[in-house]
Structure formats: C-alpha cells, structure tokens
Amino acid sequence: MPTRARVALLSTYYAPVIGGAEAGASRLATYLHRRGHEVRVITKRTNADHPERDTIDGVTVWRRPPVGPRTAIGKWLWLPWAVSALSATRSEYDVIAVVDQRASGLAALVTRWRFGTPVVFQPQVQGTLDGRHPQTQGLMSAVHRWVSWPLRRLYGRADAIACIAQSIVREGRNLGVPDSRLHYVPNPVDTQVFRPLDDTARAEARASFGLRPDEIVFTYVGRLSREKGIRNLLLAWRKAALTGCRLMVVGPDMKDHPWDEGPWARGYVESEGMGESVTFLGPLPHTTIARLQAAADVAVLPSHFEAHPVAAVEAMAAGRPIIASNVGGVPDFVVHEQSGLLVPSQDEAALVAALRRMATDSHARTHWSLAARQTGEQFGEQIVLERFAELIDGLALQRRAR
C-alpha cells in the first residue's frame, strides 16, 4: 500500500497555457511530486504542437482532445475525453483533484459515481458554487442561478472543496455543503522567489529594467483582459497625472478573446502620449516578475472580480504595498491602510486618489511594505500546499478504510 496518495489532477488547461488556474495546478502537481506522490495531470490539448504525453518538472502530463485554443466552450467540449482518461487509468490513482472544476468537475464526479474514487475540488473563480457570478447582474443573475442550480448541486457532492477564498467557503455553505467538507486552502506563492532584495541588489534590479533611482515604480501583473481592469488602470493613470512615476505592465494579451484589451491598451498609451510613463513588458518568466516586483515600489490590482489573485500575494511577498479592488478574496489578505489600499471595483475616481496617495506618501509605502511582506509569508508553498496534500492523503485513507 503506497504511503502517499496517488493523484489524478484534472486541470482544463495546463502549461504552457498561462493563467492563474494553470499556475495553481502546476504548483500543486509539482509539490505533490516532490512530496513523494505519484501524480498524473490530465488536461486539454490546446495546440497540435504540444505533445499528447509530456513530462514537466517530473510530473506526467496527458493532453486529451479536442485540440483547440483556450475558449469558454472549450472547457466543456473536452468533457467526454476527460471521463475517458479517468476511466482508462482508474487503477493508477487514489484521489482525483480538480483545479477549476467546471466540466472537469463533472468528469471527476462521473468517475466517483462509477468507481467510488474520492474527489476534491478547488474552485478558482467566484460563483461556481452559489451561481452569483460577478459578471451577471439583475435579471441575468437570477436566470443564471436558476439554470446552473442542478450543476451546482452536483458540485456540492465532492468529498472535499478546497476554497481559495473565504467568500468561496461562504458559497459552499449557501449551497448546503457541510463545514466538514469545506477547507480554506488559498493559492500559494513561492516566498523563496518572491522576496525583498537588499538595497544593493534592488538598485541593480532597477537598473536592469531601465528604472531611475528616484522614480516611483508601479506594477501591473496580469492578463491584458477586461476583467483584470487594465483599461480602468490606464484611464486612471492618465487622470492622476503623476510626476516622477512609472507604470510597468506585465502580462499577455488575450488573443482571439472578446475580453482582450491588449491592442486597446497599447493604442491608448500611444495616442495619449503616455509612453514615457507606461512600459509594456509582455509576459515574463516567473523569476523575472519576482525581480521586478522587488525592484518596484507599489503593485496595482484593479480587477473587476477575483477569488484569490496570486499575482497580488506574490507582490506582497516581495515587500510591495498594493492598491487593489475590494472584491472576492482580496480582503482576506489586503488590510486597508495597513498593507495597502482597497478601492471599489471600476471606481476610477477612487483609483486615481489611491495612485496619488501611494505616489506621494513615502512613509505609508515604507510601513505598508513591511506588513505586506509579513502577509505574503503566510501564503508560502510549504504552508499552503502541505495543507492541501494532507487533505488529499486524508481522502485516500478514508477510501481505504471503507
């Protein structure tokens, strides 16, 4: 009998696809592998150039059809292939872990029904348990909750739900899931990579990014996508008219997606003559982002909705105070006027005021940076992922005891 649970990890998308859920799945799979678990990742094949079977950081990755880019409907089209993959390998795992459940969650529950395999979900967005999606309002919100009710009831049958935000814990309760199956397990950060630099190393890092020693540097890290608030940030940046400040924008476009803001963002900066104060860096390696955050002064997260944004916690682990939208799980770790500033989502005036405050209040930046680092350390991989691994092992033990 193995000492560690064997895990089938379902993630609709996985490396080299970039995104918060994908990063979370990768960190979990890699940690479990290092801990001594046998791990197989089952994911959708987004490009024919990506091999069907792969090994990434020691973890086996099996990419299943249909081949196609990341789309909303794509999350559902691969459902039968996910079920098939789980069925074909059912003797090779003890627990199914699902990151961002959607159709993957249904595939896992079908397997649980057929073979009794325990399932743990980790919802990555708000609304998948209580139906109150942040993007729907009024009548559409009521319709969405009614239509999605049967699916959400099925999700509630998972053996455990690892909630990345306290707001998702509350969603589970509203769905009728008992507290014994709800676990607060936020997304982790690598606090060995995301950490403050000493004065000499920080000066060298700033110079490597072409930053002047005297300018106040703000960072935005995330997809150039509507819901991430990049348009709101750039509009506010122009109105704030900050002197001696630079905004460094890191992240990929959402090509072929209706929420893609990349072309608009670059065009707006050029048309408004903001090129001297706004720099687009595109997607960067993880270690480079960590170096930039440590070199900067303030991080900005202007999202319309979030569950537990890893980029924000990473910035705080690097010692950066943060301006963030007061949404979802953000208040779980950002304390207003202690580690940063919370502003209402899509409130341009409030965002302008926060940018000006951070640009001019060096005393607050210094003190809040210390609190930010202390907060970030609480989300270290060893702390958070060990909690998740113990949950998985517990489910395997329960199954063996039946």
Image (tube, rainbow, N blue to C red):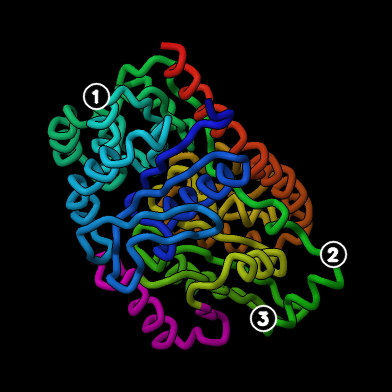
Q: Mark 3: give few (<14), some (14-19) or many (20+) Cα within 10 Å.
A: some
24 vs 74, left or right, is right
Depth order, front residue of 243/61: 61
Quote the CA–CA distance across marks 3 and 2.
Answer: 17 Å
Image coordinates for residue 97, horizontal then vertical, percent: 41, 37
In the rendered structure, does residue 251 fall within the stretch colored magenta?
Answer: no
In the rendered structure, does residue 266 fall within the stretch colored magenta?
Answer: yes
The secondary element bearing badge 1 is classed as helix
Above-or-below relation of 177 to 120: above
Residue pointed to by mark 3: 209
Identify the magenta region: 254-281
Amino acid at the residue labelled 2: Asp
Q: Please say whether residue 168 is visible from this viewpoint.
A: no
Depth order, front residue of 60/21: 60
Image coordinates for residue 197, horizontal then vertical, percent: 79, 64
Q: Label for residue 198? A: 2
Quote the CA–CA distance across marks 3 and 1.
Answer: 53 Å
Going from the N terminus, do you reach mark 3 or mark 1 first? 1
Going from the N terminus, do you reach mark 1 or mark 2 first? 1
Image coordinates for residue 84, horizontal then vertical, percent: 22, 43
Q: Residue at x 64, y 59 (%)?
A: 357
Q: Residue at x 57, y 73 (%)?
A: 247
Residue pointed to by mark 1: 113
Q: Mark 2: give few (<14), some (14-19) or many (20+) Cα within 10 Å.
A: few
- Quadrant location, the C terminus: top left
Q: Are marks 1 and 2 in contact (CB under 8 Å)?
A: no
Q: Label for residue 155? A: none
Q: Residue at x 48, y 54 (%)?
A: 23
Residue 144 location, quadrant: top left
Please state which of the two labelled residues, at mark 3 or mark 1, is closer to the viewer. 1
Amino acid at the residue labelled 3: Phe
